[in-house]
Image (tube, rainbow, N blue to C red):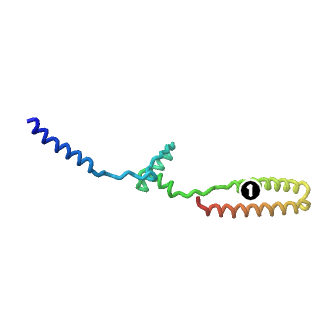
Amino acid sequence: MFWILLKRLIPMVSLKQNRMENKTKCGRRPKELHKKRRYQINVKLMTDEFYELKAKALNAALPRNDYVRSCIKHSVIVQRLTPEINDLIRKLCGMANNLNQIAKRANQAGYNSIREEYLSMAEQIDKLIKYIRHDCENSNRQQF
């Protein structure tokens, strides 16, 4: 009786082994490494910021995570002021200070004696302001 059972079990075991060896992988393919979301950033928000994010995501009909991802992907950052413009603004402040000193001397000594100095300083200030405006307009057109 034992041998009869053993003869029946041996083919069954070999059939299972054959099935396991020939079995192809089922299910979803693993994602490529560059498509996996492996990085996590924790951001602390104030209450009003959190509810604003929540409302905007709801209006966009997206989960918050997807909304933030789309904001990152589609946002355009424009540099506010370059170091060169900051330097020019400092120079402009210095010129304004010089102009105030000229105005004070003009009030003390009379306008006619200081007129030429005032006009040259005003001309330099106008040139600098035009340059800053032109530079800011060009930098706002550039997208990073």
Q: Is residue 50 left or right of residue 123?
A: left
Q: Position of residue 101 (x, y in %)?
A: 84, 53
Q: Nearer the viewer, residue 124 or 108?
A: 124
Q: Nearer the viewer, residue 142 or 38?
A: 38
Name the image quarter holding the C terminus: bottom right
Mark 1 — residue? 88
Q: Position of residue 72 (x, y in %)?
A: 51, 54
- Residue type, mark 1 in image: Leu
User: Which of the 4 image quarters holds residue 17?
Assistant: top left
Q: Nearer the viewer, residue 89 or 141?
A: 141
Q: Is residue 21 left or right of residue 44?
A: left
Q: Nearer the viewer, residue 100 or 124?
A: 124
The residue at the point 17 percent across, 42 percent down is 10
Q: Position of residue 76 (x, y in %)?
A: 55, 58
The residue at the point 64 percent across, 55 percent down is 80
Name the image quarter holding the N terminus: top left
The residue at the point 15 percent across, 41 percent down is 9
Element under disc 1: helix
